[in-house]
Image (cartoon, grey):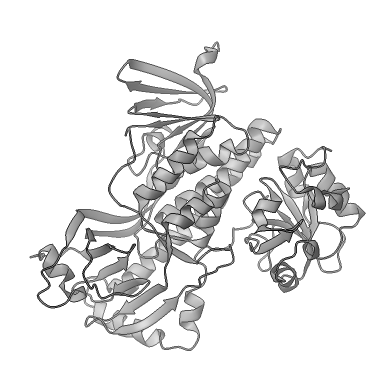
Amino acid sequence: MNVDEAARVPVVIVGAGPVGVTAALLLARRGIRSVVLERHRDVYPLPRAVACDDEIHRILQAAGVGEEFTAISRPAGGLRLLDARHRVMAEFRRSRRGRHGYPQSSMFDQPELERVLRDALAKRPECELRGGVEVTGVGPDTAGPVRVTYRDDTGEHELWAEAVLGCDGANSLTRDAIGGVWEDLHFEERWTVIDAETTGPVRCWEGVDQVCDPKQPATFMRVNDTRYRWEFRQREGQETVRELVAPWLPPSYDGDFDVVRETQYTFRARVADRWRSGRVFLLGDAAHLTPPFVGQGLCSGLRDAHNLTWKLARVLQQGGDERLLDTYESERRPHARHVVRLAVAMGWAMTGGQDGAAAIRRRALAAACRIPGLTERAGRDLSPPLTAGPLVRRGVRRGLVGTHCPQPWVSVGGRRTRLDEVLGDSFAVLTATGPGPSLTALAHGLGIPALPVTDLGDDGTLAAWLRSGRADAVLLRPDRIVMDVVPSGGRDFTSTAAWSPLLHTTRSPVPSERTAPKSLLRSTT
């Protein structure tokens, strides 16, 4: 097939929301060029997502905007369950510092996040954003590049890409192009969402309130100093905005109260039945839709981007096997489905549903919340370990494999920084003690550092983490998930034969200064 070189691009990303732009930034950090196609010319100005967890903050760090996100977000205290009279039934507290090195829960304004991401995108020569365009076609599948057509003010255009990422939302053209259909997980409710600005004395705490009232379930949170969000399930004879929010304001309050947005959403629970066809992939709302009850909608989309981009870069740039791309859907789809089901379960438990058993469920929930230790366990990370597969050692039911490595502050060469800044953008080996000849040879072959945690100058977090998993060493993937372990007393990683063919591991130079500080490179030689 003869294709005009001017129309060739390694990756086309359809959609410039947070998921699409984050994917472009993650690819750019690995030297992969992309063109992002977006129908809006500027950031969508109204608030949508307002919460994320510490894993997502870490992904934004990987995309190069971690500190910028810190500046526009605030830590949130967790979740409270309230009864119909707004009495607290249970609290699920979230820490100011989670395992990923950031507050376990943060509140933010999505337009501010999108501006941060687009500002970063504009500084990357590997990225090009084309706004004000309408994508008209993707594919069909071919043995060569994927054809993407779009129109703008000047007419019809086409691009030919080695890969296409469909980050184009719930009504995804990309999903239709690959023949994907929704799997319905049986949750659908109409809710009113209200975003408002006020300097009035709103009754709130530093987290999220969920009113578990079957007659009028509601969710409430403070986003920033003056911005608040309310969500109410719709019912017949819906009240006015001021009537709905009255329980959170002083009686007869008549001060400033500016409604930024009042809209109706249908909360759905769905997962696409396929996330990939050839080199065309679905991410974010194109692949899954979740009710908002555990605040994981945007989080799941950014996890998609983090999971896929390093694999795609490996295939496009470093000789990775095409089968490596199969692990995107096999890892992310079960994970996303679990999170959606969790949101559905939490939604039915907290809102009580609309059937005759609602009051019984609410009383059962209140009783369960009094069980010692339950609220503490429920307040832990919502992101489960990845299921077993080629990049997650088969047969492991417990331990570190498939989980994230914690990210403490470390001290290297007299400089205090976060762990991921030391590890760089590729694989890494962490060892409890100095690496032996076998681990050194493997690290050298992958072109990655092998670092004793005792040399990292942290607070003991990493050594304790290895001990808890009975591991002498771990192999971390670029997304900081443990791919393989050397068990205590062992000498080698346990499943090299499963993952090494996917990576096309060959002997390569020791990492450059960009990958790891010079003071640590001695560990791999």
| Identity of the residue drawn at 65% across and 54% down | 420
| Residue 439 % position (x, y) | 85, 53
Which residue is located at x 69 percent, y 68 percent? 399
Measuring 51% from the left and 70% from the top, which residue is drawn there?
A: 96
Q: Is residue 190 visible?
A: yes
Q: From where the camera sits, is residue 287 visible?
A: no
Relative vertical location of residue 34 with respect to residue 153 in this rendering, above or below:
below
Taking depth in this image into account, of 309 and 371 the one nearest to the observer is 309
| Frontmost residue, 274 versus 418 | 418
Residue situated in front as seen by the camera: 417 or 363:
417
Q: Is residue 252 above or below residue 426?
A: below
User: Residue 383's x, y, as percent?
Assistant: 52, 62
Q: Is residue 346 above or below residue 141?
A: below
Q: Position of residue 24 (x, y in %)?
A: 51, 37
Q: Is residue 322 left or right of residue 137?
A: right
Residue sitting nearer the eye, 522 or 431: 522
Residue 104 drawn above or below residue 65:
below
Which image quadrant: the N terminus?
top right
Count all numbered tags in the image, as a single digit.
Answer: 0
Apparent side of residue 413 relative to residue 81 in the rendered image (left or right): right
